[in-house]
Amino acid sequence: MSGDTINIALVGCGTVGGGVAHVLLAHADRVTQRAGRPLALRRVVVRDHAKLRDPIIPRDIISTDIADAIHDPNVHIVVELVGGLGIAKKVVLDALAAGKHVVTANKSLLADAGAEVFEAARRAERTVCFEAAVAGGVPVIRALGESLAANQVTAIQAILNGTSNFILTAMAERGMSYAAALAEAQRLGYAEADPTLDVDGSDAAHKLAILAQISFGVAARPHEIARQGIDTIDAMDIRFAYELGYTIKLLAEAWTGGHSHSTNGAKLSRGGAANAAHANGGPPTVALHVAPVLLRHTDLLAQVRGAYNAVLVYGDIVGETLYQGPGAGQMPTASSVVADLIDLGVGRAQRTFAAAKLWSHEGRGFTVEPPERVRSRFYLRLQVADRPGVLADITRILADEEISISSLVQHETEEGEPGASATGAVPLVIVTHYASTGKFRKALERINALSTTAAPAVFFSMGD
Amino acid sequence: MSGDTINIALVGCGTVGGGVAHVLLAHADRVTQRAGRPLALRRVVVRDHAKLRDPIIPRDIISTDIADAIHDPNVHIVVELVGGLGIAKKVVLDALAAGKHVVTANKSLLADAGAEVFEAARRAERTVCFEAAVAGGVPVIRALGESLAANQVTAIQAILNGTSNFILTAMAERGMSYAAALAEAQRLGYAEADPTLDVDGSDAAHKLAILAQISFGVAARPHEIARQGIDTIDAMDIRFAYELGYTIKLLAEAWTGGHSHSTNGAKLSRGGAANAAHANGGPPTVALHVAPVLLRHTDLLAQVRGAYNAVLVYGDIVGETLYQGPGAGQMPTASSVVADLIDLGVGRAQRTFAAAKLWSHEGRGFTVEPPERVRSRFYLRLQVADRPGVLADITRILADEEISISSLVQHETEEGEPGASATGAVPLVIVTHYASTGKFRKALERINALSTTAAPAVFFSMGD
């Protein structure tokens, strides 16, 4: 099979764009063979001409005018690598309106405006591909949309932010403090100068919103997803978790009430947890959150180290499958962008897009469980005064909210030891049985208001 | 999008076939939605009518005549689940000749007769899908063929036999002997009454042959792939490996001379190893083998436990990505078969098949490295007489073959301890630096011929 050349315009040529240009130009023969036709890089649009110095890109295809690319009648595919919502959204909508297919790595755009973008694409009878928008080089979009098509996904557990995973790995394996691990991540280029969106869970929430749309048909906006970052994790928590048999990971999770699995050491037995409405004859619900989660040491995701991403998917037919690899970086992301371009060349992507009906009114019947109703076990670490009656007050509050205690750790501490504060407060760790998040939060408020509580309580979800 | 009904004939309705029928019948709405058209189970062909008792399958679509299915003008896709080479091959070739698409889970058929089957398909302008033929529910065929299409794969390391991995996990984690672990695998249904094809590496070699065709365009017959099983692994080897920092896994591996990676703790630095010919201006080569391999405890594949399969793929653009999940079993395998059916319904599979040109004359320029030229590090365990000069003889032989020693373990043993045999022989473990397999085998022959060697040497490859 061989066909006409497909012409590509790259809008935005920073790190990832440079990688895409490199693959298309340096491996043109390979790409042609795989796509069944030549994929020609016809235009590269940049903000500042002078900044683009890669000698492999011919000077005469570079321009600073986006309209050049979008309205070139010879361009068939626009690759949007500007990022963010403003210009990027306009580029994508204009390109679709001009009859171009779009390939994008823009998680924010899809998470925030997926419905608008996909509707525009359907109206224009064009295709939007976005493998690179979630987990970089890990082909999880194809896995969910094609490979697992026989399944209804019942749960997803994912490490979608490499920066956070790098920091947590450094804290766990090298005993570093959060601040020191973050500083190292910045020094190595894994974290931005302002790491907020990585460490507060926002980045992972955007990606989870996309996965939840594909798997459950729900259109959750990122800000509607319950979200907790890693910045409250103390070295002490890593140690307590280890002692209890757990590793702390920042997970993006989605799980349905029907979900219950326990295989290969991995366990996600939150069955019946999210889904009271369904049991009462209502529509099935899916719980979504991004949060630090305590995983058993033997869980598959507990073993994902450094800046890697990994997505564990539970399907009702297949059971659990895992997809792991580099979640960011120039060439891993370029690999996914070029895979999308090849799919458009082969003609697969157009069929997948039409069949998937993403961000359409044709959902899968799921609604998002209100966060306060989501049930989980919790890890709770308190700094409390070392005197009689303190534990009685705390356990009374938990009992009032119908939260029972699974395990409890309080060590003897001596003045000056880590953990023993100047005020004489000592750390107390409680692991609860299943409780609704709403009731847990209420208990938390009351516990934080106790005069014997020296600092706001720190809490994380349990993975089992 | 919705289209005409696609009619399916199932030839063979054992464990996997029953699973496929179940998904198509019990989840017909879901399958229709995902495929964009109904996928109707129109015929089920079995050898013995009486044996098929699943009440979900309507009696009137069951028959015992294969020709019924293949020559039914209303059937569009034949699913071959007979297995093996004889009847299965005829079913597939006849179905293609009759103008049907084929979905198969038959690794032997593709590994042994892929060229003939695919040529027949191209002649008939029909498509063959085979996601389920390798690693069961793990979608590695799509990963290699579509998701990683921008890459030239430089290496594959895979656990493709769940039975062997179950046995090795039981030996490592519970200190069981090989015989006891095998017996448990049989009791739990992970191993057949005759486990030969699983534990001798044949099953994995068939699957590796298919992956090597997709990734490197080489048409290696399974019997041409160097193969070593797990039946020579003693509990002692698991312990020695552990002491040296390694876990033993049965791996199917393919690696090119250009390959060199070291990321996330995983390491496969055999660069320049397989590829002397290429360096001299010859065509690039790929080394293939199935063998017990010593992996660092932190390697991703070292952590794959129980009956799971996992495939680690190194791409020259993306780096390493991992695919893991259930490698066998009724529903995992059915998940992959139905994914293929949905792909045919959507129309993706036809385009993928045409573009991939598998088992055609259009290769990727690779040839298979002759096994004796493949370079590796080796773990070597000898039972030697505990007397002067023994070590001198052995190290002299290794030196003669230009094999240098990386590490050596010999413990003091007392009469009656495990490892100390009745003849007074003691175990001696040597880990070598890189050596060509040919020279290593020559040294091995000479060592086994020594009068001080009490039993044939046991050896495995090192993963780094």
Image (tube, coloured by chain):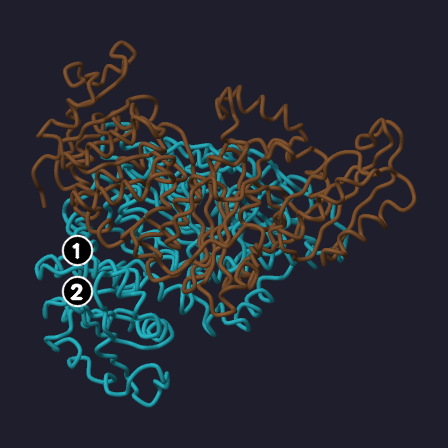
Chain colours: A cyan, B brown
- Residue A418, position in %: x, y? 70, 56
Residue type for callout 1: Gln
The residue drawn where x is 15% and y is 69% is A76
Residue A101 is marked as 2
Q: Quadrant of residue A43?
A: bottom left
Q: Quadrant of residue B222?
A: top left
Left or right position of B83 against A261? left
Tally of numbered tags: 2
Asked whether the beta carbons under mark 1 and mark 2 sit within 8 Å of each other, the answer is: yes
The residue drawn where x is 8% and y is 41% is B3
- Residue A194, position in %: x, y? 45, 72
Left or right position of A175 against B1? right
Marks 1/2: CA distance?
A: 9 Å
The outermost residue toward the top is: B50
Q: Residues within 10 Å of mark 1 (few under 14, many from 20)?
A: many
The outermost residue toward the right is: B388
| Depth order, front residue of B21/A234 | B21
| Residue pointed to by mark 1 | A350
- Residue A53, position in %: x, y? 37, 86
Whether residue B175 is situated above or below residue B247 in the rendered picture: above
Residue type for callout 2: His
> Mark 1 — on which chain does it sit?
A
- Residue A375, position in %: x, y? 40, 37
| Depth order, front residue of B355/B185 | B355
Secondary structure beneath label 1: helix
